[in-house]
Image (cartoon, grey):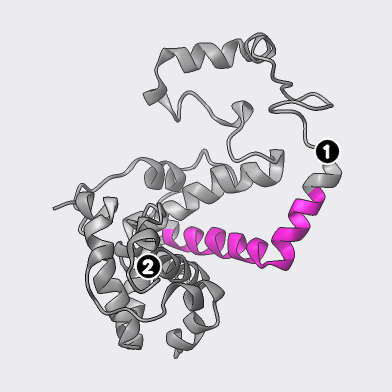
């Protein structure tokens, strides 16, 4: 597949806003919290993009590197030339998803888990995180208190002044179907729905390559693998 990645990057408004005149000073790497934890260097990514080398960009799209960024945007606040490496990472990530390259890396494959949880939660409930959709089994790091909260959620949230899954105003209120339909329409016209479909389809192909079970529900082997597996090869 002969793709001009440079041309595609330049069509993205985030790329236009994020890369103005990098002089390779390295301040973005010096300030980057992810660079302290991972084998990650924002400066080298910007250099690869500036070289306009399609092969290098393709390697980035298939790599772990572009998934290390935490999107804190510290780089934006410190760059003396007004660049935002975090925006460039966003653009690279979208290309990686668009062409299915995210399945080539351990961290990239986690896009499937994000899509199946936070992504679908937004469309189903109107919330990124909702008590009905955050299971204790998947978040045991929260300890037994979270399990107790889930078992008594109606009484607890009422006591805290929330309006859990009920009509009217208040935190965690029920989002009307009209609003959810509008949200879905936004996803449709902005290609978010198409991107979700690609993530699902490419993840299914990867599951087959890894001989792992795959289904529409999150209770499948591939989801459990990408959600829990850590090769411990990402830090210095």
The residue that mark 2 highlights is 85
Q: Which residue occupies the foreground of this view, 92 or 161?
A: 161
In the rendered image, which residue does mark 1 sit on? 176
Q: Is residue 57 magenta?
A: no
List x then y, in percent, for residue 61: 37, 72
Q: Residue at x 30, y 63 (%)?
A: 65
Which dot marks residue 16? none
For the record, the magenta segment spans: 181-206
Of helix, strand and loop, which mostly describes the magenta segment?
A: helix
Q: Residues within 10 Å of mark 1 (few under 14, many from 20)?
A: few
The answer to whether residue 158 shows anywhere in this view is: yes
User: What is the crowding at mark 2: few (fewer than 14 residues within 10 Å), some, or many (at least 20)?
Assistant: many
Q: Secondary structure at mark 2?
A: helix
Q: Is 135 drawn above or below residue 71 in the view shown?
A: above
Near-viewer residue (220 or 29): 29
- Mark 1 lies on a secondary structure that is loop
Q: Looking at the image, tell me whether mark 1 or mark 2 is earlier in sequence order.
A: 2
x%, y% of residue 145?
45, 13
Question: With 210 as the anchor, is 122 left or right in this view?
Answer: right
Between tags 1 and 2, which lies in front? 2
Q: Estimate the x, y position of residue 153 in percent, counting from the top left.
A: 62, 14
| Coordinates of residue 185 in the picture (x, y in percent) | 78, 59
**Would you say residue 234 is visible in this rendering?**
no
Q: Are marks 1 and 2 in contact (CB under 8 Å)?
A: no
The foreground one among 132 and 22 is 22
Residue at 41% across / 50% down in the picture?
A: 212
């Amino acid at each position: 597949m002969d793709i001009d990645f440079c041309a595609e990057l330049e069509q993205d408004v985030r790329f236009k806003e994020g890369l103005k005149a990098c002089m390779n000073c390295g301040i973005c790497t010096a300030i980057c919290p992810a660079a302290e934890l991972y084998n990650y260097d924002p400066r080298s990514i910007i250099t690869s993009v500036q070289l306009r080398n399609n092969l290098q960009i393709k390697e980035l799209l298939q790599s772990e590197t572009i998934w290390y960024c935490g999107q804190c945007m510290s780089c934006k606040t410190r760059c003396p030339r007004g660049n935002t490496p975090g925006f460039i990472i966003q653009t690279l990530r979208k290309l990686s998803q668009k062409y299915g390259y995210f399945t080539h890396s351990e961290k990239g494959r986690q896009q499937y888990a994000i899509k199946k949880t936070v992504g679908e939660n937004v469309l189903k409930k109107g919330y990124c995180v909702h008590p009905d959709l955050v299971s204790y089994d998947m978040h045991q790091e929260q300890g037994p208190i979270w399990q107790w909260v889930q078992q008594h959620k109606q009484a607890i949230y009422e006591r805290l002044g929330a309006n859990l899954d009920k009509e009217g105003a208040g935190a965690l209120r029920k989002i009307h179907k009209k609003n959810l339909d509008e949200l879905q329409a936004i996803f449709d016209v902005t290609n978010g729905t198409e991107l979700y479909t690609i993530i699902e389809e490419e993840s299914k192909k990867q599951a087959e390559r890894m001989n792992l079970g795959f289904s529409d529900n999150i209770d499948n082997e591939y989801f459990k693998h990408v959600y829990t597996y850590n090769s411990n090869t990402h830090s210095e």
